[in-house]
């Protein structure tokens, strides 16, 4: 019995010391599109995001990386009485440097904490068009934040892994270029509705 317990302890200790080696690189990212058509209000909402990410382990279980991409959202509404179409859209260039620390749970399972500085540089645009007139407005903005995200990473094999983040803790500052004041947002808590999943390709050493 003692031998079995000792063997189990040695196996558990060995698994818990598995590490992602310094010099390992990986590719991941976010790609998403959604479209909702509401026939009751004659409105359509579309969202599109693409943010490829590259990471590099500067030490065992410690990685730094950068995500760069584009995000767009739009809402189009048509007034049946006046026949006026309104389109509100947001376009943004997204940059997100990060550092991530892993802790080994098992041979293939890791938990991690990620410190991220997401930035978005874009514009909000409103377009109004009717039978007799049309006009547009445009406002440029900058958004900068600091987030901490907890997550899990499971390696299917040496080259592929599935990761999940659960909520985030952070701060964001949003400011329109033509306005003097900005908006500060704070987000603290584990929100199960904010769970995200991703696939990562690892260039194993």
Image: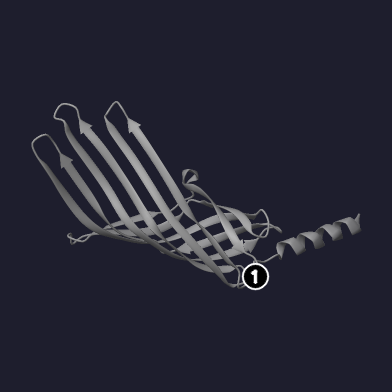
Q: Position of residue 11 (x, y in %)?
A: 80, 60
Q: Residue at x 59, y 54 (%)?
A: 152
In the image, is residue 21 above or below residue 118? below
The residue lying at 17 percent from left, 60 percent from top is 178
On the image, the x and y values in percent for residue 14 come to 76, 64
Decide if residue 143 is on the left or right side of residue 86. Answer: right
Q: Quadrant of the N terminus?
A: bottom right
Q: Residue at x 40, y 51 (%)?
A: 49
Near-viewer residue (50 or 154)? 50
Residue 81, x across and y down, in percent: 15, 26
The front one of 96 and 145 is: 96
Q: Name the residue at 30% across, 44% down.
A: 74
Rendered-image quadrant of the C terminus: bottom right
Q: Give left or right: position of 163 versus 115.
A: right
Give the structural element (helix, strand or loop) at label 1.
loop
Q: Is residue 70 above or below residue 46?
A: below
Total marks placed: 1
| Image x and y of residue 85, in percent | 19, 36
Q: Is residue 185 above or below residue 23?
A: above
Crowd around label 1: few <14 · some 14–19 · many ≥20 (10 Å): some
- Colour scheme shown: one colour
Point out the residue furthest to the left here.
132
- 185 horizontally vs 140: left or right: right
Residue of label 1: 21
């Amino acid at each position: 019995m003692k031998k079995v317990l000792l063997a189990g302890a040695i196996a558990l200790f060995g698994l818990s010391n598995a590490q992602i080696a310094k010099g390992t690189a990986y590719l991941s990212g976010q790609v998403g599109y959604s479209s909702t058509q509401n026939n009751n209000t004659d409105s359509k909402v579309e969202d599109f995001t693409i943010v490829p990410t590259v990471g590099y382990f500067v030490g065992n279980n410690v990685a730094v990386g950068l995500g760069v991409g584009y995000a767009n959202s739009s809402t189009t509404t048509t007034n049946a009485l006046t026949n006026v179409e309104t389109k509100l859209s947001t376009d943004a260039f997204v940059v997100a440097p990060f550092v991530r620390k892993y802790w080994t749970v098992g041979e293939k399972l890791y938990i991690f904490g990620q410190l991220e500085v997401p930035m978005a540089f874009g514009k909000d645009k409103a377009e109004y068009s009717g039978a007799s007139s049309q006009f547009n407005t445009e406002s440029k903005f900058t958004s900068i934040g600091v987030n901490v995200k907890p997550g899990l990473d499971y390696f299917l094999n040496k080259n592929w892994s599935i990761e999940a983040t659960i909520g985030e803790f952070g701060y964001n500052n949003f400011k329109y270029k033509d306005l003097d004041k900005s908006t500060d947002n704070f987000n603290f808590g584990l929100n199960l509705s904010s769970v995200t999943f991703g696939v990562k390709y690892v260039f194993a050493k």
